[in-house]
Amino acid sequence: MGDMPGISVAKQKVDNVWDKTKTKTKAAIEFSHQAERLGQYAPDQENDTTGSTQAVEAKFITAQDPVIVTADGGRLPAVPVEEAIKLNELRDIVDDRDPAEKVPIKSEPREAKDGTIHGVRPNTRSSKAESSQDAPLGSATPPSRTNPLFPPLPMYGPPTLMRRVHVLLFRISSSILSLCFLLVIILGAAFTSIPLAANHIWMRLTFRSPDKRRPFYHEEQRRRKVRKMAERTWKKQKNEASDGHVNGEDGQKTNFDFVPLEGGPDSIPCDVRYYARRVGLDCEIFDVQTEDGFIIELWHLYNPREYKRTDSAKRSPHAPEVFPEDFVANGSANGASGSQYRDGDKKYPVLMIHGLLQSAGAYCTNDDDSLAFFLAKSGYDVWLGNNRCGFKPRHNLLDYSDPRMWAWNIRQMGVMDLPALVSRVLSETGFPKLGLICHSQGTTQTFVALAKEQRPELGEKISVFCALAPAAYSGPLIGKMYFKFMRVISPGMFRAFFGMHAFIPIMMTMHSILPPRFYGAMGYRVFAFLFNWTDDRWERDLRDRMFQFAPVYVSAESMRWWLGRECFAKQKCILATREEKTMEDKEDEQEDQELQRSSEENSDASDSDNDEDEKSLQQSRQEERREKDDTAQAGPVFPNHQLGKLQPRDKSRARFAWYGPKTPPFALWVCGADDLVDGRRLLRRFERNREPYVDIVHSKVIEGYEHLDVIWAMDAIEKVGKEVREVIWRTADAESRKICRVPRGCDEVRDFYVRKDKRSSATRAVDASAGEWDKKAAEQVGGGGGEGDRDLEREVEEGEEKINASVDE
């Protein structure tokens, strides 16, 4: 009887072990099923070529983005959070791992005024998770209701017979219906061009030139003459150089630092390197792997006279992790740029991100007036980032036909593509931060990535965010008939029309088979019809180039996010709902009324008292109101010689703010005639101090500018480029400036940005001279591209002299 307690204890231990074994066995079976469900292929579909593609772990990039790691170390795109948690919890049981020992992931949900919770909230099952923003990975759960801005993406498992049939049906339906949609757009563009064509024909018949109505007509004629002469000179005296004279693209005395390597008649290829070589630069391509396995391209501009092209093996993809340990030191010693320039002569890195349906080549089509070439020649280390798929859809595991290759939208571009590009640039240059320049959709993915609930830590790697035509709020164009059509159809019907792969891929087929000039002309007409653009401010002889880098492959899901019934087209904002916008409008109206009453009271007091202080206060308030007026200040204003006034950081507004304290300073250039996006509304958000942690170091509205004029207008370098160049240098950190050469045009900069307790808020400037010659723009454009320091007439004379001398010989 004395042995009975011992026997009972032993039996209980055996039962516990048996229960644990049964639980572990059950977990192992469930883990196997889940691993197969989230893997690339089913076990019976794998072979020696594919290797083992079963899921072994879900790696949380952010609290909302768990990517799948396969048995062979490959990466698959993000899956729903609950599926990832299930996989990890089952593996914890199988491997006897304690979930509490996992590295926590920082998750800060964002609360909106209308009660919407953006991002992932800690699981209510865990009191520890509730009290901490750094909840364990397994505790991250989706919000209780679908996020109205970023609804969940479809989930596709390994290819089965049913899935193949499903995909095939969608591909057949979408190829037919999307082609019909495209034909309607082309016919619409052709039909609306008839009155314009008729008007042109009539003017020709009456011996008038329709081109004379263009604002920069005479300058276009001068440049055309110079370009023709340069082509003839290049043909006659190719590669001949003596006494600092190079018979390059312009047939002129050329800046010795930038010797053209290409010339002659423009063949208009879709090749950034070709255009870089025409202005004395060159380009190399780096392949970058994102954290979810996509391979994207990063183009690096350099001066071949001072930089040795990197070996192709060093330009291959790195591991998918971003910002590896000691990336600054390693980049400085071994990076492509970091190892080639000594301290004091380094170039500050700049990353440029393109807009919707474009590639980074959009920054490289205007010869020396191209923003990328201008900054490179000014002394910056310029890198051009391309988003996923682009011209060459690539993934480390998936192929084009797999729908998982295309299950992404703007959020994945922001939290995956952008950090991968920033990380690679910093790893190759050895700098802790870089200047970021984005246009249109590029600004959207950055605005999204930096939000509190997304990837705010990225802001610590960016010295300034320069937003050109910032796309945060929609413009009136979203109400056009063909956009409304996309908004009214259901998600299922959207996929039937446009598929679950690339969006209207026949556009890329047309790009590859049509002659470049015909394709460029057709591309302009179609996009002008869609987006209300004109080429009035562009150099028309270069227009066909501009459309060689568009469109590119984008996912149908991405276009559904922009134009479908659930997201941007419905909310008309990337980070706020319609309800929240309405609430903000009412707040603005109340503030304006209070300010007006206060101004009237001060005016009465001033009249009765004649108090000089009161007068000054009244004048100051009136000036503030004028600065915030969208139509104030007719004429060019360039506020880049001051960083702006300081405002207290109103922490009470931080609760509903989009951004937190890690956000870099912003600089914004808004197009005044932009129907695609509403940049003024975004400026108002910052001016009303709704973002207490965002410093605005530059703010400008260019009246008359359309969406693409900020990068393609003939006077864009004067109105945008030179200010961007200066803003980047003003905001670079002191240690980086010590080891860098001073960019051209920045020698007189003294007022450098330093983050302070008070918020910097640059006064909004309004430049109303677009489409006409203000003095500075006339001088810059009249002197050719880039700095505007060329004598075009003298270049023509020299070219003619050389050609005549060659003929005489």
Image (cartoon, rainbow, N blue to C red):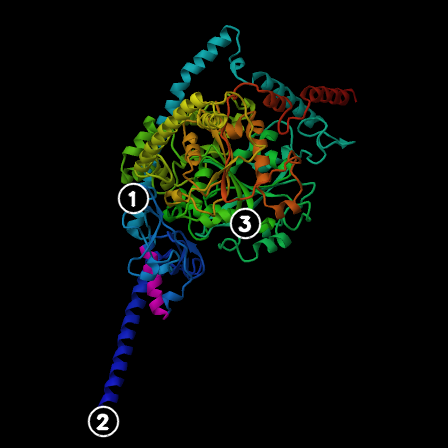
- Residue 180 visible somewhere in the drawing: no
Question: Disc 3 marks which residue?
Answer: 424
Span highlighted in magenta in the image:
82-96
Mark 3 vs mark 2, CA separation in Å: 72 Å
Identify the amino acid type marked 1: Gly
Q: Position of residue 69 (x, y in %)?
A: 41, 58
Residue found at the very far top of the displayed protein: 206
Q: Is residue 95 magenta?
A: yes
Residue located farthest toward the bottom when viewing the structure as drawn: 1
In the picture, the disc for residue 2 is 2
State the residue position of label 1. 115
- Tell me if mark 3 has few (under 14), some (14-19) or many (20+) residues whose alpha carbon lies within 10 angstroms of its own: many
Q: Nearer the viewer, residue 1 or 263?
A: 1
Of residues 470 and 614, the one drawn nearer to the viewer in this rendering? 614
Residue 754, picture quadrant: top right
Q: Nearer the viewer, mark 1 or mark 2?
A: 1
Q: For the residues marked 1 and 2, what is the alpha-carbon distance in whole angstroms?
A: 66 Å
Q: Position of residue 612 (x, y in %)?
A: 50, 25
Residue 94 forms part of the magenta stretch? yes
Residue 422 vertical placement versus 243 (above, below):
below
Which secondary structure lies at badge 2? loop
